[in-house]
Image (tube, rainbow, N blue to C red):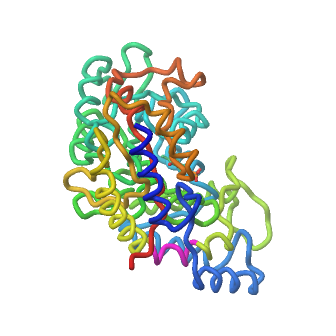
Amino acid sequence: MNEQWLTFANAIKDLYQKDFVPLHEPTFDETEIEYVTDCVKSGWVSSVGKYVDRFERELAEFTGVKRAVAVVNGTAALQIALKIAGVQPDDEVFMPSLTFVATANAATYLQAVPHFVDVSEKTLGLDPVKLEEHIKGIGEMKNGKLMNKQTGRVIRAVVPMHTFGHPVDLDPLIAVCERYNLVLIEDAAESLGSYYKEKHTGGFGLVGALSFNGNKIMTTGGGGAILTNDDKLANYAKHITTTAKVPHRWAYEHDEIGYNYRMPNINAALGCAQLQKVPMFTEQKRQLTEIYQNMVNSLDSVSLFKEPAYTKGNYWLQTLMLEEQHDRDAILDCLNENGVMSRPIWTPMDELELYKKMPKADLTVTKQLKTSLINIPSTPLKVK
Ligand SMILES: *Cc1c(COP(=O)(O)O)cnc(C)c1O
């Protein structure tokens, strides 16, 4: 088996023309340098400045929502998204077990309880059909609220996550939310530039969250944003992420316990330059998929994950799906040892010690996928 994986590793190094190929690197050019330099020269590098306003405006336009609020990172964006969507202490929140830990942590910060559900093989994200089956088993409606019969808690919201930039099947999920009075909050941290039925992800629910961490499709160094079509919620998000200070020419009045989660202007300057390139990055990543497809054709019992029906994904991270007979860890060892950075998908949340005792549904597909998915280098390639 090593033979074919060695050949594969060498082909990736040839493709990137490097001896070591990282999983994902940011791509910058003169524009980033120009904007960041302008920001430094202006002196306005910190909590206020024209780039924050501009970045928020341009993000809203790009994602097709009314408002975007820029914050320090994607985890903070998720936490505030859940809070302004009405998630209360002791509420349960449905989310996939197969996600990055920030999704679960955001709920925990609000003293809410993550409730893990299964994903679909077609989207790698939350499965609306299995979600509804699970609700029928454990839930009952009481005074218009979905209650978990086993724990006695209110189930308030659903947080789908668009894995590696591939949108979940949103229409049936929205229908489930309507039937059981659940608030929809999208963890769109990985799906900037991804569309479901030609509409950008992050704007389907009451609130959505983005991340601009260094490894995402675009970066602000560190950063995130809250998306919403509701002006009141956007204003509230801005207020509580900027210490809940009541506007005044000189007085310090704060009307609740807020957070210092604002995005610095210098990060927003980088963001303005990067955002312009998201369509190009997406196109380059989609072309990379075609290049990888040719390479994967010569591997036995391995396929390249392709976008689900009705979606146009950003292919943030390219994903191999291994059939059962493969030894995933041996493949990871081989690729990483030979200069090709590769990673398994996350350990499912329900298997982490800290989240073991949380309520959960049948997670058969999650269990299957956790040992069969590998991410391979995905930095956008300049196409010749
Ligand atoms: C990256 C990511 C986040 C959090 O983003 P940070 O900016 O790193 O805090 C949240 N959820 C998912 C699924 C992510 O991939």
Vertical position of residue 42 compared to residue 343: above or below: below
Q: Nearer the viewer, residue 270 or 322?
A: 322
**Residue 134 appears at what percent x and percent y?**
29, 23
Residue projecting furthest to the top: 150
Q: Residue at x 50, y 21 (%)?
A: 358
Vertical position of residue 252 compared to residue 54: above or below: above
Vertical position of residue 68 compared to residue 256: above or below: below
Query: Residues in magenta?
Result: 271-277
Q: Residue at x 31, y 21 (%)?
A: 139
**Residue 276 appears at what percent x and percent y?**
46, 78
Placement of the N terminus among the 4 image quadrants: top left
Indicate left or right for 193 with 27 as reference.
left
- On whether residue 145 falls in the magenta region, the answer is no
- Res. 325 visible in picture: yes
Q: Residue at x 58, y 81 (%)?
A: 29
Q: Nearer the viewer, residue 367 or 201?
A: 367
- Res. 233 visible in picture: no
**Residue 116 appears at what percent x and percent y?**
42, 28
Placement of the C terminus among the 4 image quadrants: bottom left
